């Protein structure tokens, strides 16, 4: 990512996947911070934030109308887009259907934004590009953004292709900013009641190094990425500062990944999905923990 260019800190923002767990939190957070939100999904959220437009993102014509303000009663210049919509995990449907839906939707959103002159794009990449479910151990921990992506599923492959696509779109248009947020497993406070059951078996959650992201902190990361003043592509791991486990991070590694190199000193429950870059560049700092919610 190159030098700052004066990013938009408020304006009209399209949020795709607005009915999902992360989408609901993102739309609400952006509205609280002064953005005019256009919520987009195939299904209407229980609570609509801002305007709502039902959109099939696999239909380029619909997406282009949305980005250019050509939808009746939903006109107006779009300043930014947050693309969260996708089939959210591997194995929910056939691999070919996952690829066709997710790759097409992302291309349509990226290309329509570019065609409409929207140059502030933030999207949900995924922790899965780091090599999840870590049947092959990670190269080192905490894992970070420095090693080449290692998709192990069709879902993850699409996420890796999105990052490559964004690289070239930004190369074609040096004024474009695209930030991919490699979100960990998104959790609402209601999900925290299940965390106690993880402690009995360290292998239950080894698939993502015992990571998670509170949806509210995920929303904070999105907002900071939108506000970030730069051009070009960048990617960031977004996780909470701790793990889902009561056991220490060092103990978990010793049991499950004893041969993996540990870089630096680990805090007792420190995340093994490094958020150092997001902290340093975006000013991201998690504000919520399951430990506080269940104390």
Image (cartoon, helix red, strand yellow):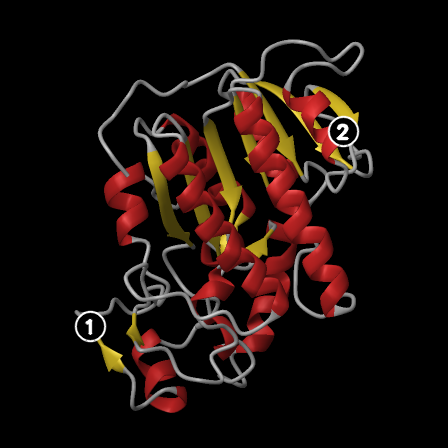
Q: At numbered mark 2, what does the secondary structure look like: helix, strand or loop? A: helix
Left or right, 101 with respect to 151, comes to right
Q: Which mark is residue 62?
A: 2
Q: Position of residue 219 (x, y in %)?
A: 51, 38
**Label 1 CA crowd tier, 10 Å (few <14, some 14–19, many 20+):** few
Which corner quadrant of the image does residue 250 belong to?
bottom left
121 versus 293 height, above or below: above
State left or right for residue 19 relative to residue 261: right
| Residue 143 picture location, percent across and down | 33, 67
- Residue 238 lies left or right of residue 194; in this view the side is left
> Which residue is pictured at 69% across the width and 44% down the height?
20
Mark nearer the N terminus (1 vs 2): 2
Measure the alpha-carbon separation of dots 1 and 2.
47 Å
Q: Nearer the viewer, residue 97 or 270?
A: 97
Residue labelled with disc 1:
263
Name the quarter where the N terminus is drawn: top left
Can the viewer see residue 153 in this picture?
Answer: yes
Q: Hey, which residue is sitting farthest front in the picture?
A: 172
The answer to whether one can see residue 288 in this image is no
* Direction from residue 279 to residue 33 in the image, left or right: right
Determine whether label 1 and label 2 are within 8 Å by CB.
no
Residue at x 72%, y 21% (from the top left corner): 65
The numbered mark at residue 289 is none
Count residues near mark 2 (Cα–Cα under 10 Å), then give few for <14, some for 14-19, many for 20+.
some
Residue 74: give x, y in percent of width and height. 74, 13
Residue positioned 64% across, 9% down in the render: 76
Residue 277: image location, x then y, percent = 27, 50
Q: Nearer the viewer, mark 1 or mark 2?
A: 2
Q: Secondary structure at mark 1?
A: loop
């Amino acid at each position: 990512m190159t030098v700052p260019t004066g990013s938009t800190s408020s304006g009209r923002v399209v949020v795709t996947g607005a009915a999902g767990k992360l989408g609901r939190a993102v739309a609400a957070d952006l509205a609280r911070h002064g953005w005019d939100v256009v919520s987009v999904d195939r299904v209407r959220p229980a609570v609509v934030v801002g305007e709502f437009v039902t959109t099939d993102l696999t239909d380029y014509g619909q997406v282009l109308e949305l980005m250019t303000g050509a939808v009746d009663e939903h006109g107006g210049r779009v300043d930014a887009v947050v693309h969260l919509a996708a089939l959210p995990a591997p194995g929910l449907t056939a691999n070919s259907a996952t690829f066709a839906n997710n790759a097409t939707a992302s291309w349509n959103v990226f290309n329509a934004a570019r065609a409409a002159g929207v140059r502030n794009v933030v999207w949900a990449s995924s922790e899965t590009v780091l090599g999840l479910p870590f049947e092959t151990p990670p190269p080192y921990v905490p894992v970070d953004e420095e090693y080449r992506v290692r998709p192990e599923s069709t879902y993850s492959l699409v996420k890796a292709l999105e990052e490559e696509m964004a690289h070239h779109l930004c190369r074609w248009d040096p004024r474009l900013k695209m930030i991919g947020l490699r979100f960990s497993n998104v959790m609402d406070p209601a999900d925290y009641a299940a965390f106690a059951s993880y402690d009995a078996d360290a292998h239950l959650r080894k698939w993502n190094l015992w990571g998670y992201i509170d949806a509210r902190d995920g929303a904070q990361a999105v907002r900071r990425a939108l506000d970030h003043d730069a051009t070009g592509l960048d990617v960031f791991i977004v996780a909470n500062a701790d793990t889902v486990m009561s056991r220490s991070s060092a103990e978990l590694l010793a049991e499950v990944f004893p041969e993996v190199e540990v870089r630096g000193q680990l805090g007792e429950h420190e995340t093994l999905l490094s958020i150092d870059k997001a902290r340093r560049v975006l000013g991201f700092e998690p504000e919520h923990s399951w430990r506080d919610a269940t104390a």
